[in-house]
Amino acid sequence: MIFNKQNIALVGCGSWGKNLARNLFNIGVLHTVCDADPKILDSIKKTYNVRICTNYADIISDPNIAAIIIATPTHTHYSLARLALQAGKHVYVEKPLARGYLQAQELNHLASVKDLTLMVGHLLVYHPAVNKLRQMIFKGDLGEVRFLNSDRRNFNQQARRDNNVIWDLAPHDISMMSYILGLEPSGVVNACGWSTNNDGVIDVAHLDLSFPGDIPAHIHNSWIDPQKQVLLTVNGSKKTVVLNDIRTEDKLVLYSIEDDGSVIVEPIHYSQEEPLRLECEHFVHCIESREAPRSDGASGYQVVKVLEEAEQKMHITNRKTSVERLAFS
């Protein structure tokens, strides 16, 4: 199938999908939008001159559509992506790639066998500030990386219906850390989480990861914080860098301590391009060039594998805590 820039279909146009629709339309590649909600489709029809539909099968069977972007609830990612790949469509799936590492592994293998592009929406690896940070690490500006800490918190009750907090937020942290280090995590050292609503859905979590070279990393995710926090700190043997994505300017700042104990603060400049637009453009480029995406199926699989390992450790920790409470009651 010859790829035409006008034949990408977007499946799912909710709170995040609408951002994808805007960027895909602006770069001239949006062909069809598929969603089950007629109100959403009506809004799309009024805003963009594109085809709309409610039936995913219509997209799968359409020979004029060569690529599908999936922005639906997490539990549907695997089945929708699998159908698309089997039909010979290039696929972009919002994070996480799947809800289990065996499913993610299957999708990655299927894309390879079919010689199709499979890309995962790990948005932060396309963020200009993150790419600048990666360059600084690789150049040795920070010295040896000694510790990473990512704090990602917001107030979100809607996501509880489809995820727990680590499946919603931690893909950003894991993919970003792996990308800036150029390393995949060695494993999950520790993981704990709490269901503050007592409904069995973990909405606060802490993960401790290890990267090759004995580099430790900590991730804090929360759905119960009314004050949004998106903060990454990377400590090096020479300098420390902080990426605060909530700020409107000076998001990336370098800190160094002089011999007299004074602290030098240096804002780092980077491109102001929208990460999501860059991500959409990258998907099109990879289809046309046959290059592997920066966030390919293999990286999507690695993230899912870490998430599943963390979730298993959480269940073990929670069971131990329950037993200890019973023993002392």
Image (cartoon, rainbow, N blue to C red):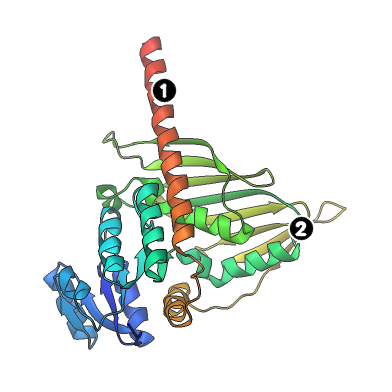
Q: Are marks 1 and 2 in contact (CB under 8 Å)?
A: no
Give 272 or 110, whichever is nearer the viewer: 110
Secondary structure found at label 2: strand
Residue 30 spot, x, y in % from top left? 30, 82
24 relative to 69, above or below: below
Query: Residue 5 vs residue 289: left or right?
Result: left
For the view shown, which residue lies furthest in the top direction? 328
**Label disc, if present, on residue 283 of the rendered structure:** none
**Circle 2 is placed at which residue position?**
256
Residue most toward the front? 113
Q: CA distance from mark 1 to mark 2?
A: 41 Å
- Residue drawn at x 38%, y 57% is 97
Q: Give residue 244's quadrant in the image.
A: bottom right
**Residue 284 x %, y %:** 42, 80
Task: Give the SS element for disc 1.
Answer: helix
Left or right for 50, reference 213: left
Quadrant (top left/top right/bottom left/bottom right) for the C terminus: top left
What residue is shown with label 1?
321
Query: Foreground residue, 112 or 83?
Result: 112
As displayed, is residue 61 above or below residue 155?
Answer: below
Look at 41% across and 28% down and name the residue there: 316
Of 157 and 73, which appears nearest the observer?
Answer: 73
As shown in the figure, which amino acid type bears the numbered disc 2? Ser
**Image x and y of residue 26, in percent:** 36, 86
Q: Is residue 124 visible?
A: yes
Q: Residue at the left extreme?
A: 38
Q: Amino acid at mark 1?
A: Thr
Residue at image position (77%, 56%) is 143
Which circle, 1 or 2, is nearer the viewer?
1
Query: Which quadrant would residue 91 be assigned to in this image?
Result: bottom left
